[in-house]
Image (spheres, rainbow, N blue to C red):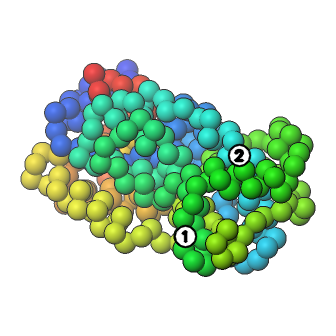
Amino acid sequence: MTLTASSPSYADALALLRDRPLVVLTGAGLSTDSGIPDYRGPGAPARMPMTYQEFVSGRTARQRYWARSHLGWGRMGRAEPNAGHHALARIAPGLVITQNVDGLHERVGTPRLVALHGRIADVVCLGCRETSSRAALQERLAELNPGFVDRYADAAVRPDGDVDLEETSGFVVPGCPGCDGVLKPDVVFFGENVPPARVARCYDAVDALLGTGGVLLVAGSSLAVMSGLRFVRRAARAGTPVVIVNRGTTRGDELATYRVEAGCSEFLTELAG
C-alpha cells in the first residue's frame, strides 16, 4: 500500500513502527537534504559509477576516478547531517544498515551502525592493505595538482562524492606512502562483494526481529541493487513487516506492508517524536 503524508493510513505506518524493535536500512535518499544528490531519485539523470574492474584496469581509469573524486570530496566533506540523520540517531534502532558512504550517520553518533559499503573518508592500499585517511590523501593530491580544484570549480557534483569531468589525463595520482601500491577508497565498488562479516551481522539483526513484533524500515533507498534488497526479501520471507519510505518506486514495493511516498527527514522526524 503506497501512502502519502495526507493519506489516512500514513498514521498507521507510523503506528506500526513506534515502540517496536527496529532495523533500519538507509540509502541515498536520506542524504539528499544534506545536498548530496542520489542516483535514482525522481529527476536524477542516468549515471553509472566506476566498477572495480575498471578501477584496477590501469592508470588512465584511476586518473579519471581520483581527479573527479578530488574535486567532489571537498564538497561532500562539507555536507552536514540533516534532520533525518538526527532523528534516526534519537530513535536508536537495534541496527542501522546504511548503503551510504558519506559518513553522516557517524557524524551524529548513530549507535549500532553497519556501513555496508564502507566510508569514503577512508583509503586502502590494494598492495599492502594498509588503511589511511582520505584527508591526508587530499593534501597529497592538492600538492601534486596545484590549481586543479580552482580550474574545475563549476563541475557538477555526483552522488558518490565525485563530479562530472571529462579531461583528467594530466592528473597526478600518488601511490601508497608505504609500498607505492594502488590506493583505492575503502568503499565497495560495483563488481565487488560486501565483506561477509558485515552481511552476516545485518542478517542476524533482521532475523532477530522475528517473534519480537519488530519491523524493518527502509528509508531513502530504491533497493535497485541486491546489497540492500536482500534484507527486505529476508524480512518479508520470514513474515516480518516491512515499511518503505522513499520518493519514487522501489524494487521492494511488492514486499512492503506499507510503502510511504514521503521525504525521509519529515517522516523520521515525526517518528522520533
Q: Pinpoint residue 58: horizontal percent, then vertical percent.
A: 76, 77
Q: Is residue 211 left or right of residue 47?
A: left
Nearest to the observer: residue 145 or residue 245: 145
Type of the residue with mark 2: Gly
- Residue annotated with mark 1: 130
Q: Is residue 166 above or below residue 126?
A: above
Mark 2 secondary-structure assignment = helix
- Residue annotated with mark 2: 72
Q: Pinpoint residue 119: horizontal percent, then vertical percent.
A: 51, 54
The quarter of the image holding the N terminus is top left
Report which quarter residue 34 is drawn in.
top right
Q: Pinpoint residue 180: horizontal percent, then vertical percent.
A: 70, 75
Mark 1 secondary-structure assignment = loop
Residue 198 appears anywhere in the view: yes
Report if the CB atoms under discs 1 and 2 are less than 8 Å apart: no
Q: Is residue 158 left or right of residue 86?
A: right
1 or 2: tag closer to the N-terminus: 2
Q: Pinpoint residue 123: horizontal percent, then vertical percent.
A: 59, 61
Q: Is residue 32 left or right of residue 106?
A: right
Residue 256 appears anywhere in the view: no
Nearest to the observer: residue 178 or residue 162: 178
